[in-house]
Amino acid sequence: MRAGIPERSVLMGPDQRSELDRDIWSRRYVPAKLGIGGRISGARIRYRGGHTREYAKKSYEIQLESGLVLHWNAESDDPSMIRNALSFHFMEQIGVPSPRTRPVWLSVSGRPDGIYLEIEAVNSRFFSMRGIRYRSLLYAANDSANFELKDPESRRRKRSLADGYEFIEGDGDTLVRLSDFIGGLHRLKDSRLQEAIEERLDLDLYFKWLAGAVLTGNYDGFEQNYALYEDDASGRYGILPWDYEGSWGRNCFGKPCSADLVRIQGYNGLTRRVFQFPEWRRRYAEELERIMETEFTEERIGPVAGGMLERIASAVKLDPARAATLKAFGGEKAFILAYIGKRRRFVRAELKRWLGNEVSLPRRQLAGGSSD
């Protein structure tokens, strides 16, 4: 244990390290050894992430011979280092299966790389441990995974409606089924559209996921940075969170952002079509209100965030590659709690404006609420 957190030790020869550094954008793995708790295992390792690959402190993905896959996030843009961990904990609490996390101290070939967040991969092991039987799994790898017909940059019709997704598991018709679903969102109308969505989408899970992304303010989480799977029994799509570093009042570069940045409907073509139907707007509004009553409060989040920050405080001081100052780290609990208060007020005001006289929520009046 280093400063009270588990240690991970990666061993690579100079040739493997040179191969890893030759192209930091490569998805190829290089052979390595991983030491955990005195045990050495064979493994493969590569860099991971987007713009953070250009940082001095890089993030990694490692695959063990046992099949276990782990992600080590440097969390370089997050002064708190807990935003992903806190978001996944929050998502789990509101009913969305989410990756487990833990802070670790990493060294590579004897050189200390410092503190990282170890994140469970969303793969077959993830679903097996939760008793979820699934037919296919896709990652929303970029903002083309927006459930729209057109490319978000070129504004031209996509070559495939499955653009933006990385195929992980499934059969030969996995992408065909997804393309048919997205096409139907734009082709069908009224009761036929509603029936198609009900048949192919787990609406309860979708509303929980959407509410979680909206409340945490993860601007990049609606059109990418999620996992999409087909439930084996129902055939419906389920959606799970991924990469929530830009949340709780900071963007993906760690810069403070306004609590009203993310609208309460989120941003993608599927949500836009779902909210054509008043009963589904009501269900989502009730879900938002339920979560703000039970989980999205300073009283619930404060102790969790405080415990996470306290656990890593000593390791943060020892980290040779941390970009954020200790002063910034020390102010993060107050920063996150202030965001929650502001976000609650904004969401309640927007719900009232969005719904107007359409619905009276049963749990409490939209203008009220504690912790504001």
Image (tube, rainbow, N blue to C red):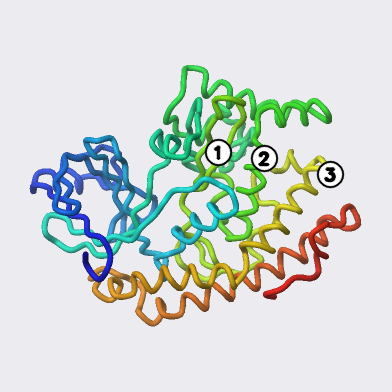
* Image-quadrant location for residue 369: bottom right
**Left of 283 or right of it: where is 239?**
left
**Left of 287 or right of it: where is 48?**
left
Disc 1 from disc 2: Cα separation: 10 Å
What residue is at 62 percent from the left and 35 percent from the top?
150
What residue is at 48 percent from the left and 33 percent from the top?
138
Closer to us: 66 or 207: 66
For label 1, the residue is 145
For label 2, the residue is 269
Q: Position of residue 334 (x, y in %)?
A: 52, 78
Closer to us: 269 or 90: 90
Q: State whether residue 295 is above or below residue 164.
A: below
Residue type of the residue flagged with mark 1 = Ala
Helix or strand or loop: what does disc 3 sit on? helix
Neighbor class of circle 3 (other Cα within 10 Å; few <14, some 14-19, many 20+) is: few
Disc 1 from disc 3: Cα separation: 25 Å
Eye-nearest disc, 1 or 3: 3
Eye-nearest disc, 2 or 3: 3
Q: Position of residue 107 (x, y in %)?
A: 18, 59
Disc 2 from disc 3: Cα separation: 17 Å
For label 3, the residue is 278
Q: Position of residue 278 (x, y in %)?
A: 84, 44
Whether residue 331 can be seen here: yes
Q: State whether residue 361 is above or below residue 370.
A: above
Of the numbered discs in the image, which one, if any, rests on residue 174? none
Residue type of the residue flagged with mark 2 = Gly
What residue is at 16 percent from the left and 42 percent from the top?
41
Residue at the bottom extreme, as displayed:
327
Q: Earlier in the sequence, mark 2 or mark 3?
A: 2
Helix or strand or loop: what does disc 2 sit on? helix
